[in-house]
Amino acid sequence: IKVNGGLGIINSRLSVEGPIIKDKLTFYAGARSTYSDWVLKLLSNYDLQQSSVRFYDVNAKIDYNINAKNKITAFGYLSNDYFDYYQNARYGYGNLIGSIKWNQIMSKSSSGVLTANISRYNSDIVDFTAKNYEYNLNTSIEQEQLAYHFSTNFIPRHKINAGLSAVRYNVEPGSSSPFDDKSAAMFVDISDEQAFEGAVYL
């Protein structure tokens, strides 16, 4: 087991990796975070002194060797960033990514890869600039994909690649609401949009 880390004045990190089952199952996990608000307190600007900023991210990976011809890899990533500018605005946004991949060796000349992915980005903004009209705005976009790739060179002097892919998109353009009961801001909700994309190649 290997552990690696760092301790800084505004952020720190830590990662761990190693085998769970020798020559069969291995893992990696890492994380980073910041605690930088104290730096803002040193600035001469009062609004920045009262503000806040932070972020963190986490990622992990697992490799599983089923046998000599089959391997599964799973990966995940999560991040979040936040900034609160005193009595002006708050910004928050995050990412989520996940992936599972199956590598298969069918023969000395043929192999295939099956992959499933998901990714999501979301943001959240609170605007305080218009007094009595403070509002909260949320948006996001999500993508899901399933794909298969096949490769073979069983024909002399030729290599054949083939595959297919399916992707689904979901977009939330924006949903705005009053920040609190005292705000006169209007509710605005733009309808979600979806799309599908397919591909076959040879």
Image (cartoon, helix red, strand yellow):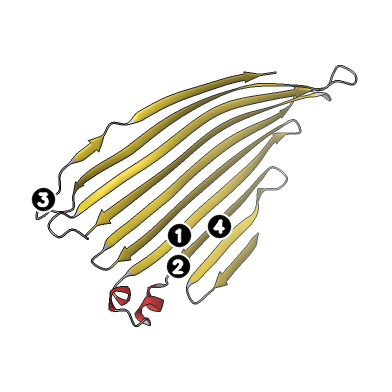
At numbered mark 3, what does the secondary structure look like: helix, strand or loop? loop
Q: Secondary structure at mark 2?
A: strand
Q: Residue at x 64, y 32 (%)?
A: 102
Q: Which mark is residue 34?
A: 2
- Please report whichever mark, 2 or 3, sits nearer to the chain's N-terminal start: 2
Residue topped by disc 4: 30
Q: Nearer the viewer, mark 3 or mark 4?
A: 3
Label 1, label 3: how many angstroms apart (C-alpha)? 34 Å
Above or below, comparing residue 45 to residue 165 in the picture: below
Q: Nearer the viewer, residue 49 or 37?
A: 49
Badge 3 or badge 4: first in the primary sequence:
4
Q: Are marks 1 and 3 in contact (CB under 8 Å)?
A: no
What is the CA distance from the residue labelled 1 to the residue labelled 4?
11 Å
Q: Inspect the image, locate mark 1, and give the three-letter code of the amino acid beneath it.
A: Tyr
Q: Residues within 10 Å of mark 3 (few under 14, many from 20)?
A: some
Give the secondary structure at mark 1: strand
Give the distance between the C-alpha atoms of the residues marked 1 and 2, in whole angstroms.
7 Å
Question: Does 132 sit left or right of 201 as displayed?
Answer: left
Callout 2: few (<14), some (14-19), or many (20+) C-alpha neighbours within 10 Å?
Answer: some
Tag 3 residue: 184
Q: Earlier in the sequence, mark 1 or mark 4?
A: 4
Quick check: 200 above or below 13? above
Secondary element at tag 4: strand
- Mark 3 and mark 4: span between their CA atoms? 44 Å
Image coords of residue 49 (percent x, y): 31, 77
Q: Residue furthest front?
A: 130
Side (left or right) of 101 relative to 53: right
Q: Is residue 42 left or right of residue 148?
A: left
